[in-house]
Image: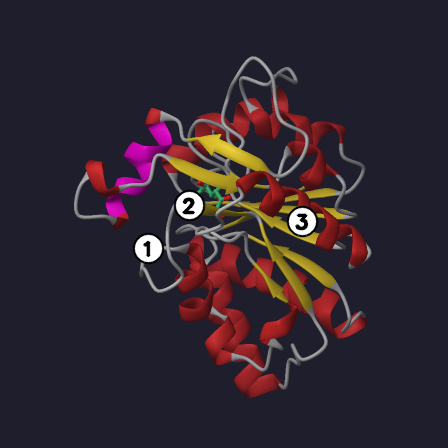
């Protein structure tokens, strides 16, 4: 387990972009797992800058996003598809045919989940997975529970998650109550995991995830079992570790 503590959000974002861009430059055909949410926005901004100013080439990359709301359409500005286009894909030379995000409009959810797993396997597995962490300890949308799901599945979102994500919607009622998410085994199967966290409201859960017991009550605590995991934190998110 590696922990980088950066002074602020901007430095955390730069460090994450530096690590991800190093992977892309060394292995242009990498399979990258991507996250959405507020935390990686700065990292995506820095990657776009690297593409424009430093020739960072996305053309051979394959990507798989962690999750998507359900149901939601791609053209809904709150969808993670829209977020990815807006924050990264439409600004870089990525091949959109190699971009994968669970389909928020899938009619057959079971089939969609099974197929998502198959596509990850056929791509050779994820080499580097970017993660955020919910204030409740979720990774992807694997919510705290007495048991965790291994593979991509339909999730009932936690009340705390709906509340946390309502900041992007007009009201709590508009936040979808379900999502499609990679499972814990899907995530743990990536060769490298890189988790980003910023701000005081993540400090407590970061401490529990890194120093607490391994428990489905804090899904991120399972990362302690992974052989190659890097936490990139800003000072506030790291403040309970010392
Ligand atoms: C997003 C995801 C979630 C977020 C988490 C933190 O694809 O899988 O686990 O990483 O909810 O969200 P923010 O960054 O908005 O605090």
* Circles 1, 2 touching at the beta carbon (< 8 Å): yes
At horizontal 65% and vertical 77% (from top left) the residue drawn is 58
Marked residue nearer the N-terminal end (1 or 3): 1
* Circles 1, 3 touching at the beta carbon (< 8 Å): no
Residue that badge 2 annotates: 69
Q: Is residue 31 above or below residue 202?
A: below
Within 10 Å of disc 1 (Cα), the crowding (few <14, some 14-19, many 20+) is: some
Residue nearest the observer in this picture, 67 or 132 = 67
Residue that badge 3 annotates: 115
How is the structure coloured here?
secondary structure
The reply, left or right, for residue 148 in relation to residue 88 is: right
Q: Secondary structure at mark 2?
A: strand
Within 10 Å of disc 2 (Cα), the crowding (few <14, some 14-19, many 20+) is: many
Q: Give the percent coordinates (x, y) of residue 56.
A: 64, 80
Q: Secondary structure at mark 1?
A: loop
Marked residue nearer the N-terminal end (3 or 2): 2
Q: Give the percent coordinates (x, y) of residue 131.
A: 57, 46
- The answer to whether the beta carbon of the residue marked 3 is less than 8 Å from any atom of ligand 1 is no
């Amino acid at each position: 387990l590696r922990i980088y503590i950066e002074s602020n959000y901007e430095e955390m974002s730069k460090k994450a972009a530096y690590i991800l861009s190093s992977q892309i430059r060394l292995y242009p055909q990498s399979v990258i797992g991507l996250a959405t949410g507020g935390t990686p926005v700065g990292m995506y901004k820095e990657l776009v800058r690297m593409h424009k100013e430093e020739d960072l080439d996305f053309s051979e990359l394959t990507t798989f996003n962690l999750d998507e709301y359900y149901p939601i359409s791609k053209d809904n500005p709150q969808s993670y598809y829209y977020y990815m286009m807006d924050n990264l894909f439409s600004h870089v030379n990525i091949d959109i045919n190699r971009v994968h995000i669970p389909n928020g409009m899938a009619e057959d959810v079971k089939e969609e989940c099974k197929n998502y797993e198959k596509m990850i396997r056929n791509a050779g597995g994820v080499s580097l997975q970017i993660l955020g962490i919910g204030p409740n300890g979720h990774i992807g949308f694997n919510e705290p529970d007495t048991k965790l799901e291994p593979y991509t599945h339909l999730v009932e979102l936690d009340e705390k998650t709906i509340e946390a994500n309502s900041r992007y919607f007009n009201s709590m009622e508009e936040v979808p109550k379900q999502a499609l998410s990679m499972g814990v085994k899907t995530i743990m199967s990536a060769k490298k995991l890189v988790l980003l966290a910023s701000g005081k409201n993540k400090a407590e859960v970061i401490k529990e995830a890194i120093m607490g017991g391994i428990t489905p009550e804090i899904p991120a605590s399972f990362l302690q079992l992974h052989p190659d995991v890097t936490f990139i934190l800003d000072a506030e998110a790291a403040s309970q570790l010392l």
